Image (cartoon, rainbow, N blue to C red):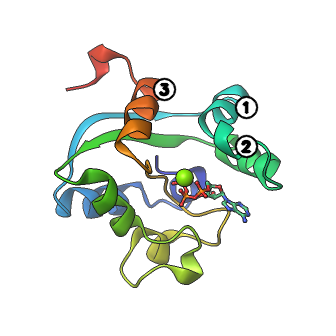
Amino acid sequence: MIKPDAVENGHIGAILEKITAAGFKIVAMKYTQLSVRDAQEFYAIHKERPFFGELVEFMTRGPIVSAILEKENAVEDFRALIGATNPAEAAEGTVRKMFAKDIAENAIHGSDSDENAAIESAFHFSGREIF
Ligand code: ATP
Ligand code: MG
């Protein structure tokens, strides 16, 4: 997902360009907005964390771009492309270093395992929307 902050700041095109230039194939994509229930479900793993309310408010405040990406070693390579959760700690040239404000508003989400990528793909897309 390209998160609401990056959409608000006009970075959709630049982020997609970096993703495709890095060799990822876009097999599904949509411009949409998460409801509070959607965001609570998507980030359910963090529901006991102190920042959960803030996270749900942030993720629902405006539209996002969700996509399914395909590549060899996609999860690891995508996490490397987006950089550390906190942009202050993200490597030079990563999406979060370039476009994120702070640890909360950090521009982009990437799945953290193949298993979660499959769950998150089904959360965002029906079979007819995946190519
Ligand atoms: P994501 O799952 O969005 O790709 P991540 O895997 O790098 O991010 P997680 O630990 O899964 O990091 O945290 C999920 C999201 O919750 C972060 O991307 C960020 O938006 C928010 N978040 C994480 N830690 C904090 C924090 N300490 N304060 C505020 N928000 C936070
Ligand atoms: Mg995560």
Residue at 58%, 34% (x, y): give it: 33
Q: Does label 1 or label 3 sit earlier along the sequence?
A: 1
Q: Earlier in the sequence, mark 2 or mark 3?
A: 2
In the image, is residue 117 above or below residue 101?
above
- What is the spatial separation of the Cα atoms under label 2 and label 3, in whole angstroms? 16 Å
Q: Position of residue 36 (x, y in %)?
A: 73, 31
Upstream in sequence: badge 1 or badge 2: 1
Asked whether the residues under the numbered discs 1 and 2 touch, taking CB atoms below 8 Å apart as contact, a structural biologist would say: yes
Residue receiving disc 1: 36
Residues packed near mark 3 inside 10 Å, few (<14), some (14 to 19) or many (20 plus): few
- Residue at mark 1: C-beta within 8 A of ligand 1: no
Count up the numbered dots: 3
Q: Is residue 117 left or right of residue 6?
A: left
Q: Label 1, secondary structure: give it.
A: helix
Q: Is residue 38 left or right of residue 76?
A: right
- Residue 119 appears in which quarter of the rendering? top left
Three-letter amino acid code at the position of disc 2: Val
The residue that label 3 is drawn on is 123
Q: Which residue is mark 2?
A: 56
Residue shown at the point (60%, 35%) measured from the top left: 42
The three-letter amino acid code for the residue at tag 3 is Phe
Residue at position x 45%, y 76% from top? 98
The amino acid beneath tag 1 is Val
Q: Position of residue 43 (x, y in %)?
A: 63, 41
> Label 2: few (<14), some or many (≥20) within 10 Å?
many
Is residue 83 shown above or below 75?
below
> Is 87 placed above or below 49 here?
below
**Is 50 above or below relative to 131?**
below
* Disc 2 within 8 angstroms of ligand 1 (CB): no
Which residue is depicted at the point 41% across and 69% down?
A: 95
Q: Which mark is residue 97?
A: none
